[in-house]
Amino acid sequence: MASPPLSKPSALYIGLMSGTSLDGIDGVLFDADAMAVIGHVHAPFAPALRDELLALNAPGDNELHRAALAANAVARGYADLVSQLLEATRTPRAQVRALGAHGQTVRHRPGGIEAYTTQLLNGALLAEQAGMAVICDLRSRDVAAGGQGAPLVPAFHRAVFGAAGRDVAVLNLGGIANLSLLFADGRTGGFDCGPANCLMDGWIARRRGLAYDADGAWAATGRLLPELLAALLAEPWFALPPPKSTGRDLFHQHWLDARLTPGLAPEDVQATLLELSARCAAAALRAQMPGATRLIACGGGALNGALMRRLAALLPGAAVQTSAEHGLPVDQVEAAAFAWLAHRFVERLPGNLPTVTGAAGPRLLGALYPA
Ligand SMILES: Nc1ncnc2c1ncn2[C@@H]1O[C@H](COP(=O)(O)OP(=O)(O)OP(=O)(O)O)[C@@H](O)[C@H]1O
Ligand SMILES: CC(=O)N[C@H]1[C@@H]2OC[C@@H](O2)[C@@H](O)[C@@H]1O[C@H](C)C(=O)O
């Protein structure tokens, strides 16, 4: 019997993402040959870690020590999730080629001589605990090359959701919203367009003690406040042209508080925040891809029925769908993108798109902690 061919290196990667909404960690096992997710797990952050990560988004006391401890805690959380994922998919650890691990963004200041972006994660500790090669710090190289360091998902969106002969947009509705523009002629664009859930989550937490507004049901009981909406939309950042990115550095509760007037009904504020998220995404899409006939939404905000209905109403020329309708559940897209970015690193292929981030050129993204 002929001996079996030398097995080619594994195409299995794990992607680990904890985003700006701070709801927890998503992990996927991803087959980079098939471009398919094999398994998915999610773990919420422990409330104390979530509070600390939120606090570290703003200047505070003893930040270096606290950031180091939080980076350790994020690494331990990621390592636990890796074990859960391997168990759930019955995958031997040795079969996974590498982990693409995002870390927790706590500061994002691209552009200019002082540019930096910080994703808290102790990559060395994660490599120790997971027993796998870790590729992390995936944004810094693009920032060093003069780019925004974000969004990074448009190249992955192109590979998965691009369609011949039509202009397709992909809208990630996480804490922050980012658009990918997949033009029919092969060009790919993308940029952050504003808040998606971060302000709504913060408001419902303060007024009702809930983590998020399920299905936008509370917002749906409120009325739109036109003066508040106008004050929110007057933020100069919205008028900036791409490339652009943002985060909790700008869209935090104090940003909202500075625009609130006394006596507003809380549910009306929530309705207006939902409208803000829908309007800034719709306006950005109309301006940058007027011919879009399909908008594919992903991220947790795609589960917000009220938000999805407003997007559909504001974009009558586009079919508003979810990534699940295209084979990838809404909560798996970002983690899959970071698994794919790990694959790009391992294959020595660039991960960024300079047309999106504004970087000086294509770059290998990430820092490697070998197994
Ligand atoms: N059923 C639901 N109804 C309404 N909103 C929901 C629902 N499920 C999740 N969400 C929203 O989605 C958020 C989580 O989304 P996701 O995990 O995509 O964000 P993220 O990855 O942390 O953010 P980012 O993409 O900005 O990095 C929650 O905080 C919540 O606001
Ligand atoms: C600095 C940072 O963490 N940015 C995130 C955030 O969350 C959404 C939006 O802001 C996007 O720019 C980015 O994440 C996605 C996954 C990206 O890089 O494509």
Image: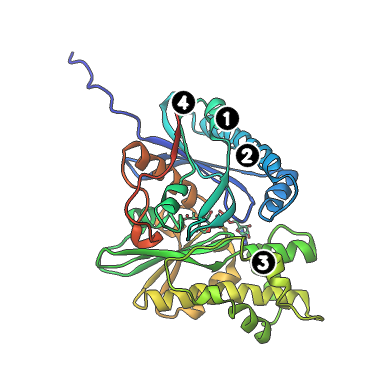
Disc 3 secondary structure class:
helix
Farthest residue in the right direction? 263
Compared to residue 49, the image places residue 146 above or below, namely below
Indicate the amino acid at tag 3.
Answer: Met
Residue under numbered circle 1? 125
Is the C-beta of the residue carrying label 3 under 8 Å from the nearest atom of ligand 1? yes
> Mark 2 and mark 1: span between their CA atoms?
9 Å
Q: Where residue 371 is drawn, which disc sits there? A: 4
In contact (CB < 8 Å): disc 2 and disc 1: no
Q: Nearer the viewer, residue 133 or 319?
A: 133
In contact (CB < 8 Å): disc 2 and disc 4: no
Q: Badge 1: how crowded within 10 Å, few (<14), some, or many (20+)?
A: some
Q: Name which of mark 1 and mark 4 comes first in the sequence.
A: 1
Residue under numbered circle 3? 200
Farthest residue in the front direction? 113
Q: Nearer the viewer, residue 331 or 233?
A: 233
In contact (CB < 8 Å): disc 2 and disc 3: no
- Which of pointers 2 and 3 indicates the residue nearer the eye? 2
Q: Quadrant of the N terminus?
A: top left
Disc 4 secondary structure class:
loop
Q: Name which of mark 3 and mark 1 comes first in the sequence.
A: 1
Q: Badge 3: how crowded within 10 Å, few (<14), some, or many (20+)?
A: many
Rendering quarter of residue 227: bottom right
Where residue 237 appears, as percent x and y from the top left, is: 54, 73
Q: Name which of mark 2 and mark 4 comes first in the sequence.
A: 2
Residue under numbered circle 2? 71
Indicate the amino acid at tag 1.
Answer: Leu
Residue 22 in sight in this render: yes
Compared to residue 362, the image places residue 280 above or below, namely below
Q: Is residue 346 left or right of residue 113?
A: left
> Mark 3 and mark 4: span between their CA atoms?
40 Å
Indicate the amino acid at tag 2.
Answer: Ala
